Amino acid sequence: MHSRRTVLTTAATAAAAAAVAGSGAAHAAAPAGGRRPRKPVPDSARRARLRRLIARMTPEEKVGQLFVMRVYGHSATDPDPADVAANQQEIGVAHAAELVAKYHVGGIVYFGWAHNIRDPHQVADLSNGIQKAAAAQRVPVPVLITTDQEHGAVARVGPPATLLPGAMALGAGGSRDDARTAGRIAGRELFAMGIRQDYAPDADVNVNPANPVIGVRSFGADPRAVARMVGGQVKGYQEGGVAACAKHFPGHGDTDTDSHVGLPYIRHTAEEWERLDAPAFRAAIAAGVDSIMTAHIVVPAFDPSEDPATLSRPILTGILRERLGYRGVVVTDSLGMRGVRVKYGDARVPVLALKAGVDQLLNPPDLALAHRSVLTALQEGELTERALDAKLLRILLLKERRGLFADPYTTHEEVDRVVGTHRHLATAARIADRTTTLLRNDAGVLPLSRRRERRVLVVGVDEAAPSGTGGPPTTVLATALGELGFTATALPTGPSPSPQRIDEAVAALGERDAAVVATYNVAADSPQRRLVGALLGTGRPVVQLAVRNPYDIAQLDGVKAALASYSWTDVELRAAARVIAGRRDPAGRLPVTIMRADAPGETLYRIGHGLSY
């Protein structure tokens, strides 16, 4: 990529701007990246220019704008040979630029597994290459580039970008201002890499501890508290320059089925939904959220046909549009997920989603089939051109609001000025210091003393966070404790430690003063229980730290000191280390209820529980 914006702002860029009749079409408030705001344009004039743009499109181009698609490779025009092969097999194109040229897609979503993300400069180059391809189309329309950067358990872009506490950690901190600040930092950094939409925040209320797909991605189990945090994060992301996306409507928090692999049912009555699930989405809408993502879940109380919400007109139009009054963009969750594919074939799903009230179709498994099916439905009158144009107008208004028609490009200089700055990293650490929760501290085990427990063994899960976003936890914790004056040794034992590995951990603890064990979603039959029990049997102080869902303590009898960090990313683990070492007081308060494992109807720790030193 040429590093100077003047090189990128070519005639092609001018053509994209001219498509909406001049620079006045772009009026988005300047993001924190530092661009000067342009003079606002009346809404009626903006809509008129965008309608003229839509009128220039062919049916094929209009249909293409509805899709947000994956593509393999780190470069828009020159990906690695293996990524070219994957693109040709799955999509029928060689690379991102060809995807834009062939299908006129309105959006592209970045994934680590698709090899889109190596480092911030590369991401910026990829984004610029995609926008250059978009500007070269017959009707130039910039691409809305998006990703899932929720932080915490789901983060696609890793260091040197700033990693911030995830949703449940922020829920434990309880500060709407912290949630807003975290969103603003995340938005600024994504914007600097050419990403103008973030599929965050998660607006689900995690009232079911057995939920296999949401968990710590939720701010918690208290609907009012979740609503406050969702509203704060929406404002933060959009102040940072990117479109926020509240998900997963109408609420994925009370299920024990993962919609990636099955079709979950939500059995809430209409009254329960209004009390539990609706407040967070109402808060997102009140905060001006640019987009809302649907859930592949069945809610019989709202749609007796038992269609998944993504395909349900009573839910998306009747409730989201009409009852809640939402006027922004509606995007599906991935159409490759099992939950949306079990009832109808892949040819019907995109059409039914559009008829239900969806605007954007995310990541269909077969783009050629999906594009052809929507085009046929338009030609045969099942979808009307008037309805299609209304969807396109919403999408283009979002793009215009996020500055894409004014200037969709970025530079290496902007990346260096914004991404992973010392100020952002320091702010992330301060926010994390307010999130670690001390659940139990019998006999004053914590904080550890450098005189009594100088030699510390750190054992437990050793998986690195996805996309290189941190970890492994044992190494990060041992390093952090070493920097705080302890002699700390990491001994990874994994989520399913073998008897031999447990014996090794016990032997290693015999030569040390205390142990910190990082646990990860401990179940009743988990070998992690045997590991913790064996460590406790040595008589040495043992500190248990839940590095994902905080419910682990219910399965760990005999633990005297228990903490929750709500994620295994470096920023949260280092904050937990400061608490363990007594450098910070544990300030987090439990945002969910923990029930007893031996008596599931009884509460072990209530929402709001948290100890201090």
Image (cartoon, grey):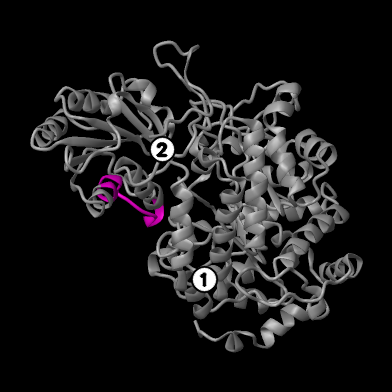
Residue 531, placed above or below residue 24: above
Relative to 550, 14 lies left or right: right
Q: Name which residue type carries label 1.
A: Val
Which residue appears at 59% of the width and 59% of the height? 184
Q: Which residues are magenta?
A: 466-477
Residue 515 circle label: none
In the rendered structure, which disc, 2 or 1, sits on the residue that comes first in sequence? Answer: 1
Q: Residues within 10 Å of mark 2 (few under 14, many from 20)?
A: many
Q: Disc 2 and disc 1: Cα gap in Å?
A: 29 Å
Q: Name which residue type carries label 2.
A: Arg
Which residue appears at 28% of the width and 33% of the height? 543
Q: Tell me if residue 345 is in the magenta stretch.
A: no
Which residue appears at 22% of the width and 40% of the height? 449
Which residue appears at 22% of the width and 28% of the height? 531
Predominant SS of the magenta segment: helix
Q: Position of residue 547 (x, y in %)?
A: 37, 39
Residue 357, placed above or below residue 55: above
Residue 345, placed above or below residue 431: above
Q: Position of residue 6 (x, y in %)?
A: 61, 88
Q: Position of residue 572 (x, y in %)?
A: 40, 47
Q: Quick one: SS at disc 2?
A: loop
- Residue position for label 2: 548
Residue 63, placed above or below residue 451: below
Residue 418 circle label: 1
Does residue 347 show up?
Answer: no
